Amino acid sequence: MTSTETSSAPVSLSTDHSRATADGAHSHAPVGGAVQGSRADRVASFDLGVIGVPSGREEEWRFSPVSRLAPLFAENLANADGVTVEPAPEVLVELVGREDARLGKAGVPGDRTAVTAWNAFTKATVVTVPKGVQASTVTRINVSGVADQAEASHILIKAEPLSESVIVLDHRGDALLNESVEIVAEEGSHLTVVSVQDWNEGAVHASTQRITLDRDATVKHVVVTFGGDVVRITPDAEFVGEGAEVEMVGLYFADENQHQEHRLFVDHAVPRCKSRVTYKGALQGEGSHAVWVGDVLIRANAEGTDTYELNRNLILTDGGRADSVPNLEIETGLIEGAGHASATGRFDDEQLFYLQARGIREADARRLVVRGFFAELIHEIGVPEVEERLLHSIDAELEKSMSVITGQDA
Amino acid sequence: MSTLEIKDLHVSVETKEGAKQILRGVNLTINSGEIHAIMGPNGSGKSTLAYSIAGHPKYEITSGTVTLDGEDVLAMSVDERARAGMFLAMQYPVEVPGVSVSNFLRTAKTAVDGQAPALRTWVKEVKGAMKDLRMDDSFAERSVNEGFSGGEKKRHEILQLELLKPKFAILDETDSGLDVDALRIVSEGVNRAKAATNSGVLLITHYTRILRYIKPDFVHVFVAGRVAEEGGPELAERLEAEGYDRYLTDVTA
């Protein structure tokens, strides 16, 4: 484990691991000099004029296929009507106009798709877990789009004080969708939100998922990305009350020519909060591309912060590319711990040999290794139906790679 | 009654400087129920022999044959060899994170037998074998070889040997890195496995101390990629007293 503990004057530091390939964690010593491009200085706005159309050279777009995402940069996106909710009996669902005062409270759009999504929607889906309620079942929010029309959708998930609930956002079918999800965890609430991207081939999806956590709230935010051509999820977690805790988990599996991007920002703006980020992905096939960027900012007043983030990529075949960039900025020395680790490795043929030497066929051996790679995280999800589906998806993905490797069906 | 027959085996590995010949004509025949010890100095090719028989892709067979009851082992994939009844206890077992020992053992047993073991007897058998090897129950829930001590890795290899019941077991320096107690426990496991199924055993070792616990029927001295001398258990005693110097001098002379 890595930890940073400094008792001297506040220091700032930032790291870029875009070319990190070695396994392992490391710790930071305070470094001098000016910090380049602090996350705290990043432009965020509800105003279209403030965040223009990106060229692809910007920090937040430098890994993205902007030409494929371009339809979602437009100002005139249609309002998506492919959102349906199957709520737990205790959970309230409303369809509201954009003037509803509850909207726009979780964070501020931080990039072009987030700002066009905010300005385009006419109706928003509001899912409320009432105060003190313990939801007895999972609430499912089903989202689908259409292949040839750029749409915007807006969803607000509001966990009132001391409530407990599990919400699954299930993205299926076709899409050219620009989505905003506001996640508001009020005092002492316990909320799990799972966002599954299981799109058809050809789908293009941008999703800003902005979480705010008030005092003593705990949020588990899970992202599972399998389908679609281009999927770009940007979860932000902002602490607004002390003693809150966020756990952000991601699993992804990128195939041939799939671009899967997960950009996270954890904003430790208040003291004594805890964040844990763990993202793991597998890649296979020519042109498979995974991007993970984890920005963590510990602001000057966020004493007692405890944060750790980790990203691991497993490249199963030639032709895959993983970019992994953890950024940790620390503006106070009075913290519990802060660290990160990033590693990208190839499939280990020695593991394969070991398992095959015990009689296990190659396809089964690969399945064991890849399931093993994801195993710990799958169990973290805590929603059995999602776990089951994930295991099936992993197996289905592996059958594709086995047919590439052996030239026949696995 | 089965026979593993190695004839005139030549093996090379690819290095930065090109192909390097390691085995230079190995001849060896092992029958069911026999224990053969292969002893030799470091770098003589003992492990290469073990991994070549198991089918590790790093080793290229340039000539010779390996047959199991007349079947061409070298034509088989790694997993086919194991299903045909071969087993290699590795010197450096590989970690497989996220795959539990119990899941791994059940998957391997199912693969080797061609059908899943009956659940109730299997659980009992695994527990019993673990107990015999002084392995705690919690072991079954750990990830394969991950964070295992050297001794735990070797016990885990022998646990697999006992459960998978191969026709032929190749033990590659199973004694290395074991203290006296662990060496005895592991050796007892090998002896139990052999007694239970009348396996043939090819015991590869650098030292004679494991031969106090596992009594070989034949001893082969391995030098510079081939068998330099063969004999009975008395040959091991002579090696204990004289070391390998005599053979090394012969080679360089």
Image: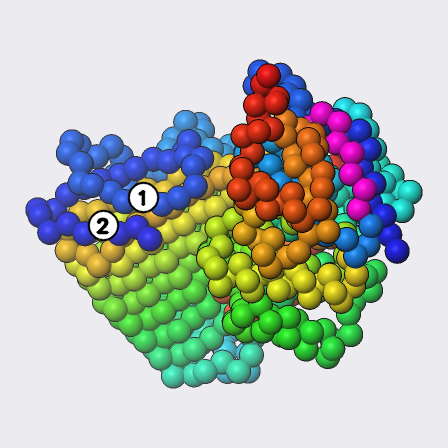
- Which quadrant would residue B244 be assigned to in this image? top right
Q: Who's the residue at 78% across and 63% down the image?
A: B197
Element type where label 1 sits in the image = strand
- Magenta part of the chain: B23-30
- Which quadrant would residue B63 be assigned to in this image? top right
Element type where label 2 sits in the image = loop
Q: Identify the residue position indicated by label 2 in the image.
A: A4
Instruction: Name the foreground residue: A210 vs A370.
Output: A370
- Which quadrant would residue A219 be assigned to in this image? bottom left
Residue A89 in the image: state x and y as whole percent: 55, 82
| Chain letter for mark 1 | A
**Is residue B24 highlighted in magenta?**
yes
Residue B87 in the image: state x and y as whole percent: 72, 51
**The N terminus of chain B lies in which quarter of the figure?**
bottom right
Q: Who's the residue at 31% across and 43% down the image?
A: A26
Which amino acid type is shown beneath numbered disc 2?
Answer: Thr
Q: Who's the residue at 17% across and 40% down the image?
A: A30
Which amino acid type is shown beneath numbered disc 1?
Answer: His
**Is residue B213 highlighted in magenta?**
no
Q: Are marks 2 and 1 on the same chain?
A: yes
Q: Is residue A325 above or below residue A56?
A: below
Using a 10 Å C-alpha cutoff, classify the residue at mark 1 as few (fewer than 14 neighbours), some (14 to 19) or many (20 or more).
Answer: some
| Chief SS of the magenta region | strand
Q: Identify the residue position indicated by label 1 in the image.
A: A26
